[in-house]
Image (cartoon, rainbow, N blue to C red):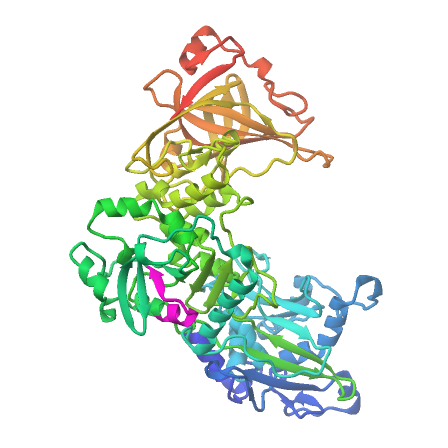
Amino acid sequence: MAEIQSLLEDTSSNGQHLADSGCGPSEGSNAWLPVISSGSNTHHAGSTISQGQEDEHPSVTVKYLIAENWGDFVEKRDARLCSRCQTFVEKLPQIADRLLTPKSENTQKPLTKPVKRQARMKGLSENQKTMPFYRQDWLRTTFDSLECSASTGCPLCAMLAMVLAYYTPEERASVDMVSFRCEKVQKVQGVIELRSNIRRRIKNREDEPKRSPLRIQQNTETWKPPVPRLLGASTDASPSLNRAKEWYDYCRNFHPECMETLNRKLPTRLLHYKNGHLRLCNTTDVDVSTRYATLSHCWGKLPMFTLTMERMKSFETKIEIKNLSRTFQDALRVLTYLGLEFLWIDSLCIVQDDSDDWNRESLLMSSVFGFSDISIAAASSTDGGQGCFYERKMPVERILHLSIGPSNESKTYTIYHPPHPEIDWHSPLTHINRSPLFSRGWVCQERILAPRVLIFNSSYLYWGCTAWNGPEWRKPEVDEPQDPHKRVGRDFDWRHIMRICSRSQLTFSSDRLVSISGIAEKFQKLFPDDEYVAGMWRKDLERLLCWSVDAPQQDDPLEYQAPSWSWASLLPGTEAKPPKDAEGIEEIFIKVVDIDITLAGIDPMAAVTRGIVRVQCEALLKMALDGMTVIGERNYCLATVGSVSMAVELRFDSERTMASANPLYLLPVCQDPGDPRKKEGRIYMQGLILRPTCKCRGEYERIGHFLKVNSPGANMPKIFKESGKIDFAKLTYTTVDRELLFERSEGEQGPHFITIV
C-alpha cells in the first residue's frame, strides 16, 4: 500500500515522456506520448493534427483535484492524460449515451466490432500485444504499463492504479491482461462504474468482475468542486468527532425506537467523569434515568489496570487517568464530546479478583448494554495500547473532472474514487465485521444489545442504531441506511445469532453459551412462550437441527461446550449456517418428544453440562461410504443404504469425524418439494449424519448434515417415489435391526425413537 501511495504522490508532478522512462512501445510510435491539454484542443505532443483530425478528436479539458493532507480539494496544474486514456475519454460521451439511454431509445451501434483475441493478436509485436485494446466500452492494459503511466503524471492512470492496488501480490503475479469495463450503476441515475477484471494465464479466462469504487458521474448541472467526504488525517480530528455528535443528537431527537425505558435499571457500578476527574460510583445513589455509555474493546495481552478488591475504596475516591490504557483514555474523550458523564467498562466496573462478583455481573449483560445510551467500540485495536483513534489507512480522495467537446456544446463528467479502507473492495460494514473487535465472541452480544453503536475503525467512523447506520461520510437525514443494525426485537431472527456468533473467537471455548446469554435472556422476554435449549429454541427445533458448516473444523473441542445437536458445540471460529427457508410446503419427518438439559449453574441461559433430545423418527438409514468426490467445499459421496446406491452431499462438522465416519447413519429430518412455480422443481431432502455413542441403546451423536437432491422423473433409487420424495413404506426393519438401531420401536415401519446427545 505504501508503494501505491508513493506512486500516487508522483502524479502531482508533470512527469516525463513515457518513452524516456522505457515504459512505452517501440521507437517511432506515438501511442504512449503524453497528451497536452490546451483548453480548446487536446493532441499528442510532437504530432501534427489536420482540420479533419481535429474533428475526429474532440477537445478534452482536464481538472485534477486531490484532497491533500485530508483537507479541501486542490487542483493540480498541467494535469495531462496519456494517449491511452485520451482515446478512452474521447469515446466517453458515446459510452455514456449508450449505457445511460433507455434501450428502447438507444439506436447507437457498438464502437467497434467484437473480434476474437486470437485474431486481434495475429501479426502484432510483443510490445503491441501489451498495448491497450478498445472494444466497445473496455479499457485494457497491463499492471506494469498502467503503473508506469501513472508515475509519469496521467491522473486517470493514477486513479486506476488505486483500484489495481487492491489485488494481492499472488493475483498480480499470474496476470496477463487488466481490463476496465464500463457498466451502468443500478438505482443510481447518471452514473457509470468502471469495474476491473484480470485475465489469468493459468486459467486462461477472465475472473468474475470485482467491484471497483471508481465511478464516472455524468454532470447535468454546472459543476462545482465538491467537499471531500472525509476531512482530517486522523479519526480524532474535529470533523470526525463532530459527525459522531451529529449522529448521536439526531438519533436521540428523531429515533424513539432506539431508546428502551421499560423497567430500566442501571449497572451495579459506573465510572463518573467530569472536568477531568474520574471515579467509580455505586449506582444505588444515581438516578435510574441517568444516561451512560459502554465501551467495547479487546483486552489483548498487555497488562491492564483493573478493579480489584484492594483498589475498591481508592477507585471510589479517584482513578488516576494516567494509569489507564490509551483505549480507555480515548473513550473518556469521546464520552465528553457526546455530552455524557457516565461510562461502563468491564475491567473497571467488575471486580476482577472476585469470582462471585464476576458471576453476578455476567448475568446482567443484557441490561447493562440494553439500557445503555450508546456503546463506544474500539474496533481496530487488538489491545488497550492502540486506542480508539487512528491515522486514516487509505489514500486521500481524488477527483478527475473532464469537459469533452466544444465549449458551447461540451459534456462534463466527474471520475471519483469514494473512500474505501486499506486494500479491499468490500463495503464499510464488511470491514467493520472483519475488524479485530467484532471477531471476538463476547462482543457479539454487546453490539446486538446496544441501542446505538459508535464504531472507531482504522480508517473512519461508523454509526449503527435501530433505525439507521452508515459510515462517516453519510448522514441519516440525507442517506438511506446501508444495512439495518441487527438488534433484538420481535422481528429478530435467531439464525442471525447462529451465523455471527459461531464464527467469532473466544479465549475459552466453554464460554460459548455464556457469551450469548444476554441475547438469549432478551429474546426470552420477547417470546415467553418459547423455551431456550443450549443455543437453540424449542419452537421449530426440528428444522433448526439441520444447521450445517461449509468448512469442517479441524479438531474437536477439548472440553464440553454444548450437545452435539447444537451449533454451540462447534469450536469458536467455525461458522454455522442455519437451514434456509423452504421454497414449498415442507414435510417434517421427525418430532422432538423430550428435551433434558443439565445446567452448569443457576442461569438457564448460560452453560450446560449435558443435553439430550429424544426424537420420534420415520427411519434411520445405515450408510457405507463407497467413495468421496470433493467439488468446491462440498463432499459428494456415493453411499450404499441397504442394497441401494445413491449420491448424497455430506457436510461433516469436523475433519476428525470425517476421517472416522464408518459406520454412520442418516436421519431424514425434512423434505422440501421446491418452488411450485418452477416447471422443473427439485426435491430437497436433508437431515443429520449420526454416529452411535456405543453407550446406550439407540443413543447417537451428531457428526454432520446431509442433503439429497432429486429431480422428478429422473432415474430414482428404489427407496424414492417417481416424484422424488422418499418412500418410507419401502423401509422396513427386522426385530434384530430395531433392537440395534432404536431406543424404542413400535413396529417394522415405526414410529421409532432415538436419543441424540
- Identify whether 566 is placed above or below 486: above
On the image, the x and y values in percent for residue 638 come to 51, 28
Note whether residue 501 is visible: yes
Residue at the location (39% across, 55% down)? 288
x and y, in percent, of residue 458 in the image: 41, 67
**Residue 714 lies in what quarter of the image?**
top right
Q: Is residue 343 magenta?
A: yes
Q: Where does the magenta region start and end?
A: 333-344
- Residue 296 position within the rendered picture, expressed as x and y whole percent measured from the top left: 37, 58
> Quarter of the image containing the C terminus?
top left
At 65% across and 90% down in the image, what residue appears?
A: 37
Residue located 80% across and 88% down the image? 52
In depth, the one of 434 and 528 nearer the eye is 528
Q: Residue furthest top?
A: 735
- Is residue 643 or residue 705 the one in the foreground? 705
Q: Give yes or no for residue 754 being in the magenta stretch.
A: no
Residue 577 in the image, given as x and y percentages of width and height: 49, 41
Question: Which corner quadrant holds the N terminus?
Answer: bottom left
Q: Is residue 481 above or below residue 243?
A: above
Q: Is residue 179 left or right of residue 747?
A: right
Left or right: 497 as drawn, with respect to 385: right
